[in-house]
Image (cartoon, helix red, strand yellow):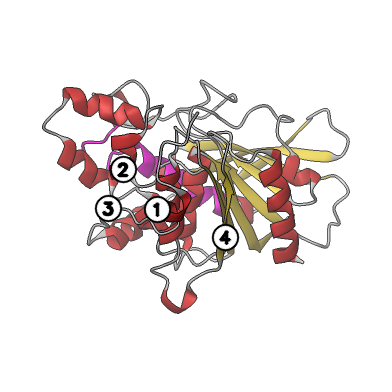
Protein backbone atom coordinates (compact mmCIF):
# COMPACT_ATOMS: atom_id res chain seq x y z
CA UNK A 1 0.00 0.00 0.00
CA UNK A 2 1.58 3.34 -1.02
CA UNK A 3 1.53 6.31 1.34
CA UNK A 4 -1.75 8.05 0.54
CA UNK A 5 -2.20 10.50 3.39
CA UNK A 6 -0.35 13.66 4.42
CA UNK A 7 3.46 13.61 4.64
CA UNK A 8 4.90 13.07 8.09
CA UNK A 9 5.94 16.67 8.66
CA UNK A 10 2.34 17.77 8.06
CA UNK A 11 0.90 14.92 10.12
CA UNK A 12 2.85 16.05 13.16
CA UNK A 13 1.00 19.38 13.08
CA UNK A 14 -2.38 18.23 11.77
CA UNK A 15 -5.46 19.12 13.79
CA UNK A 16 -8.95 17.75 13.28
CA UNK A 17 -12.02 19.65 12.16
CA UNK A 18 -14.11 17.67 14.66
CA UNK A 19 -16.09 20.04 16.87
CA UNK A 20 -16.66 19.22 20.52
CA UNK A 21 -20.32 19.77 21.46
CA UNK A 22 -20.89 22.45 24.09
CA UNK A 23 -22.52 19.89 26.38
CA UNK A 24 -19.98 17.10 25.82
CA UNK A 25 -18.93 16.92 29.47
CA UNK A 26 -22.50 17.21 30.73
CA UNK A 27 -23.62 14.41 28.40
CA UNK A 28 -20.91 12.07 29.64
CA UNK A 29 -21.34 13.09 33.29
CA UNK A 30 -24.98 12.09 33.01
CA UNK A 31 -24.19 8.91 31.07
CA UNK A 32 -21.62 7.71 33.61
CA UNK A 33 -23.87 8.68 36.52
CA UNK A 34 -26.75 6.67 35.04
CA UNK A 35 -24.46 3.68 34.48
CA UNK A 36 -23.33 3.77 38.10
CA UNK A 37 -26.93 3.53 39.30
CA UNK A 38 -26.65 -0.17 38.46
CA UNK A 39 -24.55 -2.22 40.91
CA UNK A 40 -21.31 -3.28 39.25
CA UNK A 41 -21.68 -6.84 40.56
CA UNK A 42 -18.32 -7.98 39.22
CA UNK A 43 -18.05 -11.77 39.48
CA UNK A 44 -14.79 -13.67 38.95
CA UNK A 45 -15.12 -17.42 38.38
CA UNK A 46 -11.89 -19.44 38.10
CA UNK A 47 -11.61 -21.52 34.91
CA UNK A 48 -9.17 -24.17 33.70
CA UNK A 49 -7.15 -22.51 30.94
CA UNK A 50 -4.80 -25.53 30.55
CA UNK A 51 -1.83 -23.30 31.40
CA UNK A 52 0.47 -23.81 34.38
CA UNK A 53 1.83 -20.27 34.74
CA UNK A 54 -1.38 -18.23 34.33
CA UNK A 55 -4.54 -18.26 36.43
CA UNK A 56 -7.68 -17.18 34.56
CA UNK A 57 -11.07 -15.97 35.79
CA UNK A 58 -14.27 -15.74 33.77
CA UNK A 59 -15.58 -12.25 34.54
CA UNK A 60 -19.11 -10.86 34.39
CA UNK A 61 -19.98 -7.27 35.31
CA UNK A 62 -22.80 -4.82 34.73
CA UNK A 63 -22.24 -2.57 31.73
CA UNK A 64 -24.50 -0.05 30.02
CA UNK A 65 -28.07 -0.29 31.26
CA UNK A 66 -26.98 -2.93 33.75
CA UNK A 67 -26.71 -5.59 31.04
CA UNK A 68 -24.03 -8.25 31.62
CA UNK A 69 -20.63 -7.88 29.96
CA UNK A 70 -18.07 -10.68 29.87
CA UNK A 71 -14.31 -10.58 30.21
CA UNK A 72 -11.23 -12.50 31.23
CA UNK A 73 -8.88 -11.71 34.10
CA UNK A 74 -5.47 -13.35 33.74
CA UNK A 75 -3.02 -13.36 36.66
CA UNK A 76 0.51 -14.76 37.01
CA UNK A 77 0.22 -18.00 38.94
CA UNK A 78 3.31 -17.18 41.03
CA UNK A 79 1.98 -13.80 42.23
CA UNK A 80 2.39 -12.79 45.85
CA UNK A 81 -0.93 -12.61 47.73
CA UNK A 82 0.38 -9.57 49.63
CA UNK A 83 1.35 -7.48 46.59
CA UNK A 84 -1.54 -6.37 44.34
CA UNK A 85 -0.53 -6.07 40.70
CA UNK A 86 -0.82 -3.26 38.19
CA UNK A 87 -3.49 -4.18 35.66
CA UNK A 88 -3.68 -3.73 31.91
CA UNK A 89 -7.31 -3.41 30.79
CA UNK A 90 -7.43 -4.41 27.13
CA UNK A 91 -10.14 -3.64 24.56
CA UNK A 92 -10.75 -5.65 21.39
CA UNK A 93 -10.52 -4.72 17.72
CA UNK A 94 -13.59 -4.26 15.53
CA UNK A 95 -15.67 -7.46 15.13
CA UNK A 96 -13.59 -9.29 17.76
CA UNK A 97 -14.43 -10.48 21.25
CA UNK A 98 -12.50 -11.69 24.27
CA UNK A 99 -11.46 -14.97 22.62
CA UNK A 100 -10.83 -18.25 24.42
CA UNK A 101 -9.57 -18.41 27.99
CA UNK A 102 -5.95 -19.02 26.98
CA UNK A 103 -5.81 -17.16 23.67
CA UNK A 104 -4.18 -13.91 24.82
CA UNK A 105 -2.37 -13.82 28.16
CA UNK A 106 0.64 -11.72 27.17
CA UNK A 107 0.35 -9.02 29.83
CA UNK A 108 0.02 -11.64 32.56
CA UNK A 109 3.12 -13.31 31.12
CA UNK A 110 4.88 -9.98 31.66
CA UNK A 111 3.89 -10.01 35.34
CA UNK A 112 0.83 -7.78 35.27
CA UNK A 113 -2.82 -8.50 35.86
CA UNK A 114 -4.49 -8.65 32.43
CA UNK A 115 -8.18 -7.87 32.04
CA UNK A 116 -9.74 -8.38 28.58
CA UNK A 117 -13.18 -6.89 27.98
CA UNK A 118 -15.59 -8.59 25.60
CA UNK A 119 -17.29 -6.13 23.20
CA UNK A 120 -21.07 -6.25 23.13
CA UNK A 121 -22.58 -7.46 19.89
CA UNK A 122 -19.19 -8.42 18.44
CA UNK A 123 -17.09 -11.56 18.37
CA UNK A 124 -18.35 -12.61 14.94
CA UNK A 125 -14.96 -11.93 13.31
CA UNK A 126 -11.49 -12.02 14.81
CA UNK A 127 -11.75 -13.54 18.28
CA UNK A 128 -14.82 -15.20 19.75
CA UNK A 129 -17.29 -13.08 21.73
CA UNK A 130 -19.89 -13.87 24.40
CA UNK A 131 -21.69 -10.58 25.10
CA UNK A 132 -25.00 -9.62 23.50
CA UNK A 133 -26.19 -6.09 22.73
CA UNK A 134 -29.80 -6.13 23.95
CA UNK A 135 -30.47 -2.43 23.38
CA UNK A 136 -33.62 -1.74 21.30
CA UNK A 137 -31.71 0.47 18.83
CA UNK A 138 -29.63 -2.55 17.77
CA UNK A 139 -32.49 -3.48 15.45
CA UNK A 140 -32.91 -0.05 13.86
CA UNK A 141 -32.12 1.04 10.30
CA UNK A 142 -28.36 0.97 9.82
CA UNK A 143 -25.67 -0.12 7.42
CA UNK A 144 -24.61 -3.72 7.85
CA UNK A 145 -22.07 -3.45 10.64
CA UNK A 146 -21.93 -1.33 13.77
CA UNK A 147 -20.80 2.16 12.76
CA UNK A 148 -24.28 3.53 12.08
CA UNK A 149 -26.20 1.49 14.66
CA UNK A 150 -28.35 3.98 16.57
CA UNK A 151 -26.62 6.90 14.83
CA UNK A 152 -29.84 8.91 14.72
CA UNK A 153 -29.42 9.81 18.39
CA UNK A 154 -26.52 10.35 20.78
CA UNK A 155 -28.56 8.47 23.39
CA UNK A 156 -28.88 5.38 21.20
CA UNK A 157 -25.56 5.34 19.34
CA UNK A 158 -23.83 2.00 19.66
CA UNK A 159 -20.54 3.36 20.98
CA UNK A 160 -22.26 5.07 23.90
CA UNK A 161 -22.94 1.59 25.21
CA UNK A 162 -19.46 0.32 24.39
CA UNK A 163 -17.69 3.27 26.04
CA UNK A 164 -19.77 2.80 29.19
CA UNK A 165 -18.93 -0.91 29.20
CA UNK A 166 -15.25 -0.02 28.83
CA UNK A 167 -15.37 2.52 31.67
CA UNK A 168 -17.05 -0.01 33.94
CA UNK A 169 -14.52 -2.67 32.89
CA UNK A 170 -11.87 -0.57 34.62
CA UNK A 171 -14.02 -0.48 37.74
CA UNK A 172 -14.52 -4.25 37.49
CA UNK A 173 -10.78 -4.87 37.19
CA UNK A 174 -10.16 -2.61 40.19
CA UNK A 175 -12.61 -4.70 42.24
CA UNK A 176 -10.44 -7.84 42.23
CA UNK A 177 -8.23 -8.19 45.34
CA UNK A 178 -5.18 -9.17 43.27
CA UNK A 179 -5.32 -5.85 41.41
CA UNK A 180 -3.84 -2.56 42.57
CA UNK A 181 -6.69 -0.11 41.81
CA UNK A 182 -4.27 2.82 41.74
CA UNK A 183 -2.26 1.39 38.83
CA UNK A 184 -4.51 0.80 35.83
CA UNK A 185 -3.27 0.91 32.23
CA UNK A 186 -5.79 0.93 29.37
CA UNK A 187 -4.73 -0.53 26.02
CA UNK A 188 -5.97 -1.75 22.67
CA UNK A 189 -5.40 -1.94 18.93
CA UNK A 190 -7.66 -0.32 16.28
CA UNK A 191 -11.17 -0.23 17.77
CA UNK A 192 -9.50 -1.19 21.06
CA UNK A 193 -7.17 1.77 20.64
CA UNK A 194 -10.09 4.10 20.05
CA UNK A 195 -11.86 2.79 23.14
CA UNK A 196 -8.60 3.31 25.04
CA UNK A 197 -8.53 7.00 24.08
CA UNK A 198 -12.19 7.39 25.05
CA UNK A 199 -11.71 5.76 28.46
CA UNK A 200 -8.61 7.85 29.18
CA UNK A 201 -10.66 10.98 28.48
CA UNK A 202 -13.75 9.81 30.35
CA UNK A 203 -11.71 8.75 33.40
CA UNK A 204 -10.34 12.26 33.95
CA UNK A 205 -12.20 13.68 36.93
CA UNK A 206 -14.55 10.68 37.06
CA UNK A 207 -12.39 7.66 37.90
CA UNK A 208 -9.13 7.44 39.85
CA UNK A 209 -6.35 5.00 39.10
CA UNK A 210 -5.87 5.19 35.32
CA UNK A 211 -2.17 5.98 35.02
CA UNK A 212 -1.40 5.28 31.35
CA UNK A 213 -3.00 4.71 27.95
CA UNK A 214 -1.58 2.60 25.11
CA UNK A 215 -3.64 3.26 21.95
CA UNK A 216 -2.29 1.44 18.89
CA UNK A 217 -3.42 2.60 15.41
CA UNK A 218 -6.64 3.85 17.05
CA UNK A 219 -10.00 3.74 15.29
CA UNK A 220 -12.94 6.11 16.08
CA UNK A 221 -10.83 9.25 15.66
CA UNK A 222 -11.46 12.37 13.55
CA UNK A 223 -14.73 11.19 12.00
CA UNK A 224 -15.07 14.11 9.55
CA UNK A 225 -11.80 13.29 7.80
CA UNK A 226 -12.05 9.53 8.26
CA UNK A 227 -15.42 9.38 6.51
CA UNK A 228 -14.06 11.37 3.57
CA UNK A 229 -10.74 9.65 2.88
CA UNK A 230 -10.73 6.09 4.25
CA UNK A 231 -10.82 3.49 1.45
CA UNK A 232 -11.18 0.36 3.62
CA UNK A 233 -13.65 -0.46 6.42
CA UNK A 234 -15.13 0.11 8.90
CA UNK A 235 -15.35 3.90 8.31
CA UNK A 236 -16.84 3.32 4.83
CA UNK A 237 -19.90 1.86 6.57
CA UNK A 238 -20.81 5.44 7.48
CA UNK A 239 -20.15 6.72 3.97
CA UNK A 240 -22.26 3.92 2.49
CA UNK A 241 -25.12 4.77 4.84
CA UNK A 242 -24.91 8.46 3.93
CA UNK A 243 -24.77 7.62 0.22
CA UNK A 244 -28.33 6.39 0.60
CA UNK A 245 -29.47 8.78 3.36
CA UNK A 246 -28.17 11.85 1.57
CA UNK A 247 -29.83 14.39 3.84
CA UNK A 248 -28.43 13.07 7.13
CA UNK A 249 -24.72 13.97 7.01
CA UNK A 250 -24.90 16.94 9.39
CA UNK A 251 -27.19 15.13 11.82
CA UNK A 252 -25.04 11.99 11.88
CA UNK A 253 -21.84 14.00 12.30
CA UNK A 254 -23.43 15.89 15.20
CA UNK A 255 -23.99 12.55 16.94
CA UNK A 256 -20.51 11.25 16.15
CA UNK A 257 -18.93 14.33 17.73
CA UNK A 258 -19.91 12.98 21.16
CA UNK A 259 -17.90 9.80 20.49
CA UNK A 260 -14.92 11.10 18.53
CA UNK A 261 -11.68 10.32 20.32
CA UNK A 262 -10.32 13.69 19.26
CA UNK A 263 -12.96 15.36 21.43
CA UNK A 264 -12.89 12.88 24.31
CA UNK A 265 -9.11 12.52 24.52
CA UNK A 266 -8.56 16.24 25.07
CA UNK A 267 -9.58 15.82 28.72
CA UNK A 268 -7.14 12.95 29.38
CA UNK A 269 -4.57 13.32 32.15
CA UNK A 270 -2.96 9.85 31.90
CA UNK A 271 0.37 9.65 30.04
CA UNK A 272 0.04 7.93 26.67
CA UNK A 273 2.07 5.99 24.14
CA UNK A 274 0.36 5.98 20.73
CA UNK A 275 1.33 4.18 17.55
CA UNK A 276 0.53 4.99 13.92
CA UNK A 277 1.23 3.30 10.58
CA UNK A 278 1.76 5.61 7.63
CA UNK A 279 0.36 3.18 5.04
CA UNK A 280 -2.75 2.44 7.12
CA UNK A 281 -5.84 2.59 4.90
CA UNK A 282 -8.24 1.52 7.68
CA UNK A 283 -7.25 4.09 10.32
CA UNK A 284 -5.49 6.73 8.21
CA UNK A 285 -2.45 8.32 9.84
CA UNK A 286 -3.97 11.80 9.77
CA UNK A 287 -6.85 10.59 11.94
CA UNK A 288 -4.43 9.03 14.42
CA UNK A 289 -2.28 12.16 14.55
CA UNK A 290 -5.44 14.23 15.01
CA UNK A 291 -6.12 12.21 18.14
CA UNK A 292 -2.52 12.27 19.34
CA UNK A 293 -2.15 16.01 18.80
CA UNK A 294 -5.38 16.73 20.68
CA UNK A 295 -4.76 14.25 23.50
CA UNK A 296 -4.52 15.97 26.87
CA UNK A 297 -4.67 19.49 25.46
CA UNK A 298 -7.77 20.32 27.49
CA UNK A 299 -6.28 19.15 30.79
CA UNK A 300 -4.61 22.45 31.63
CA UNK A 301 -1.92 22.07 34.28
CA UNK A 302 -2.59 18.31 34.31
CA UNK A 303 -1.62 17.88 30.65
CA UNK A 304 0.03 14.46 30.36
CA UNK A 305 3.28 13.39 28.76
CA UNK A 306 2.73 11.61 25.45
CA UNK A 307 4.69 9.97 22.67
CA UNK A 308 3.93 8.28 19.37
CA UNK A 309 5.72 5.51 17.48
CA UNK A 310 5.57 5.86 13.68
CA UNK A 311 5.71 2.75 11.46
CA UNK A 312 6.36 4.24 8.05
CA UNK A 313 5.94 1.17 5.83
CA UNK A 314 3.17 -0.64 7.68
CA UNK A 315 -0.54 -0.85 7.06
CA UNK A 316 -3.15 -1.46 9.76
CA UNK A 317 -1.07 -4.20 11.36
CA UNK A 318 1.03 -1.37 12.78
CA UNK A 319 4.04 -2.26 14.89
CA UNK A 320 2.74 -5.61 16.21
CA UNK A 321 5.45 -7.36 18.25
CA UNK A 322 7.77 -4.36 17.90
CA UNK A 323 5.16 -2.09 19.45
CA UNK A 324 4.53 -4.54 22.26
CA UNK A 325 8.24 -4.52 23.08
CA UNK A 326 8.07 -0.73 23.10
CA UNK A 327 5.07 -0.90 25.45
CA UNK A 328 6.86 -3.30 27.78
CA UNK A 329 9.76 -0.88 28.03
CA UNK A 330 7.35 2.02 28.53
CA UNK A 331 5.50 0.34 31.40
CA UNK A 332 8.68 -0.88 33.03
CA UNK A 333 9.91 2.69 33.17
CA UNK A 334 6.52 4.04 34.28
CA UNK A 335 5.86 1.46 36.98
CA UNK A 336 9.41 0.89 38.11
Tell me the element at label 4: strand
Task: Tell me where residue 197 appears, x and y as whole percent.
Answer: 47, 52
Question: Can you see residue 109?
Answer: yes
Q: Tell me whether circle 2 and circle 3 mark residues in contact (CB < 8 Å).
A: yes
Tell me the residue that label 3 is attached to: 17
Stretch in magenta: 149-172
Q: Is residue 70 above or below residue 327?
A: above
Give the mark, 3 or 1, whose residue is nearer the N terminus: 3
Q: Tell me whether circle 1 and circle 2 mark residues in contact (CB < 8 Å).
A: yes
Which residue is painted at 73% across and 64% down in the image?
333
Give the mark, 1 or 2, whose residue is nearer the N terminus: 2
Tell me the residue that label 1 is attached to: 290
Tell me the residue that label 4 is attached to: 307
Give the mark, 2 or 3, whose residue is nearer the N terminus: 3
Residue 118 is marked as none
Tell me the residue that label 2 is attached to: 225
Task: Tell me where residue 322 appears, x and y as whole percent.
Answer: 70, 43
Q: CA distance from mark 1 to mark 2?
A: 10 Å
Q: Nearer the viewer, residue 113 or 17?
A: 17
Q: CA distance from mark 2 to mark 3?
A: 8 Å
Amino acid sequence: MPLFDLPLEQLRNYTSGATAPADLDAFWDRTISEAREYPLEAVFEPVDNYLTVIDTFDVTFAGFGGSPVKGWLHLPADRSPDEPLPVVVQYAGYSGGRGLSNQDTKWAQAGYAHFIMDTRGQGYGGLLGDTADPHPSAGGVAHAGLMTRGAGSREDYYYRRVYVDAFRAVEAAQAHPAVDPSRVVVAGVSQGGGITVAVAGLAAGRLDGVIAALPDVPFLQDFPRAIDITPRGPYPEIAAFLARHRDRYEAVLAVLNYFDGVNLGRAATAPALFSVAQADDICPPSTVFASYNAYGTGAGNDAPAKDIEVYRFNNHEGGQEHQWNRQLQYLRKLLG
